[in-house]
Image (cartoon, rainbow, N blue to C red):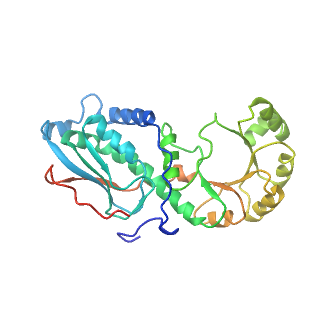
Amino acid sequence: MSRGEVFGTTRGSTRRAAPAPLAPHLIAMAVANALAEDLGLAGDVTTNATVAAGERSHAVIAARRPGVVAGVDVAAAAFRALDPDVKFRVVTSDGEAVAAGAIIAEIAGLSRALLSAERVALNFMGRMSGIATLTRAYVDAVARTKATIVDTRKTTPGLRAFEKYAVRCGGGGNHRVGLFDAVLIKDNHIVAAGGLEAAIISARGAVGHLVKIEVEVDTLAQLEVVLQHRIDAVLLDNMTPDQLRQAVALIAGRITTEASGGVSLATVRGIAETGVDLISVGALTHSASVLDLGLDFVAGAAAPAKRTKKV
């Protein structure tokens, strides 16, 4: 991609709906832990030794490469944790695509706070924006099919809510959040339970009517057994496109279909064209590259930041 090229615009200029925001208490806890890790027992010794207390600065967060933004509120929380009076103006909102060089936010506050919170703010935003950017690539790859791209539980420990939020910023959907909010019967559950039908019957008897049950199958023969029971979704694991088409025809819209396994940007379109409802992609969170972002100080604390055209 050349400098200035905008990422993720193959669906035209339609503005995407903003994703449901992260809970403020989750942001506060994560930011506090990250700052504690970075500042340690002595604080920012470099900044404290070189920058006078009370000095104020103006800075911008800018994209070094094109991508999709996520985590602006988390970055703002990092700066506010060290300077409650910091002024943080959002220029590019979560879920928006930006060109290289575009300004994402303008910040004015205590110089020490801006410098000490910089890495925490950029670490969160870079990681989350990288996930949003990769998700947008998958979402665009299945455009004009019925398939929805969803994530998995292959997330960074402690950061699941943030990474799943980033997937939503990229236009994808979320699979179950954890082990607690849905039943997903997989191959090892089937072995441990004494068989496929035994696992389904036990699960149906153990959970309430609001808890959905999904079962993983890797053969059409297993699928035929599963369809004899009352379940909500089936995970078609590592099936070929031809097998997926047969499975979709066999299910005939009775339950939600999800394809998983062996999904890449090279294969996702073919999988989507089989007619499945969902395609789960672990790579969205376990293999996304960090989006390169930077914090740049602007000379003169009172000077307005030069605004780059927002995309």
In this rendering, position of residue 89 left or right of residue 203? left
Please tell me which residue lies in front, 107 or 35.
107
Please tell me whether residue 122 is drawn above or below residue 158 in the rendered image: below
Q: How many marks?
A: 0
* Residue 178 coordinates in the image, percent (x, y): 60, 37
Answer above or below: position of 88 versus 304. Answer: above
- Residue 68, given in percent of the width and then of the height, sits at 44, 58
Residue furthest bottom as drawn: 2
Picture quadrant of residue 253: bottom right
In the displayed structure image, the side of residue 306 where residue 1 appears, left or right: right
Residue under the point 80% across and 53% down:
219
Residue 11 percent location from the top left of the image: 53, 68
Where 210 sits versus 228, above or below?
Answer: above
Residue at 39%, 43% (x, y): give it.
74
Q: Quadrant of the C terminus?
A: bottom left
Q: Quadrant of the N terminus?
A: bottom left
Point out residue 189 in the picture as x, y percentages from the top left corner. 75, 37
Residue depicted at 15% across the width and 50% down the height: 302
121 left or right, relative to 114: right
What residue is drawn where x is 83% and y is 58%? 250
